[in-house]
Image: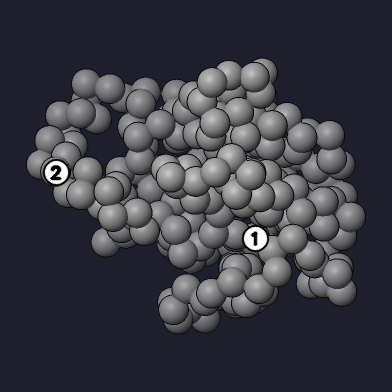
Amino acid sequence: MKVLIFGATGMVGQGVLMECLRDPAVEPVVTLGRTATGIHNGKLREIVHLNLLDYAGMETQLAEFDACFFCLGVASTGMKEADYERVTYGFTLAAAEALSRARPGMTFIFVSGSGTDSTERGRIMWARVKGRTENALPRLPLKAYMFRPGFIQPLDGIQSKTPMYRTFYRVLGPVMPLLRRTFPNQILSTREIGQAMLSVARHGYGKRILETKDMRTLLSQ
């Protein structure tokens, strides 16, 4: 299986990348983003592409993939809605539209978030924008799936790019085993998200929007 990963330098994207590199049935693994990951692996190819709204001339490159894991995102804290929408909706749809033209029917997995607002009319800005993005993807000729993780436990030395989140994870680290036992349907590790994505890419799933409990169901199969 040939996979393309957007956002491979972020916390979720790093976890997904590591799982793809570990899986012997996944090759090549290709990342696409404005910066390289710095990881060296014989299975890995990296495409540095500065304009994430324009993929003109890349049709041949994009046509080779069986699945795309779109993990690119930013924290909404302190952002104006237009700026957040440009990244969350604009970057996602630009990539999905280009891939749907290059390889109609391919699997496209978008990392959304627990609490996303499918009505697009709620009071929470990030939830509205992610809801709009989720609603737009199934209109394209893709097998689009939306992953809505809740709390994410970083493993393998992965850290969030957001300083506030890094502090939060550091404080909660000692009690994480207890939290996982107490709230099993609210917490997933970066490894588990990557494994769940690979499962959906291979076998599909009966729902297009997957909450944490759905991802856990996949992992138990």
Name the secondary structure under disc 2. helix
Q: Is residue 179 left or right of residue 45?
A: left
Viewer-nearest residue: 65 or 162: 162
Quarter residue 101 falls in? bottom right
Name the secondary structure under disc 1. strand
Can residue 37 be seen?
A: yes
Give the amino acid type for the residue marked by disc 2 in the picture.
Val
Tell me the residue at 68%/37% (across/down): 133
Residue matched to label 1? 3
Which percent across, then down, holds residue 31?
59, 68
Tell me the residue at 63%/68% (across/down): 32
Viewer-nearest residue: 88 or 146: 88
Q: Nearer the viewer, mark 2 or mark 1?
A: 2
The total number of labels drawn is 2
Q: Is residue 31 left or right of residue 58?
A: left
Which percent across, then down, holds residue 138?
78, 33
194 in relation to 157, above or below: above
Crowding at mark 2 (Cα within 10 Å: few <14, some 14-19, many 20+): few
* Real-space CA distance between mark 2 and mark 1, rounded to the nearest whole angstrom: 34 Å
Give the amino acid type for the residue marked by disc 1 in the picture.
Val
Q: Earlier in the sequence, mark 2 or mark 1?
A: 1
Q: Is residue 218 left or right of residue 154?
A: right
Residue matched to label 2? 171
98 in relation to 51, above or below: above
Can residue 207 be seen?
A: no
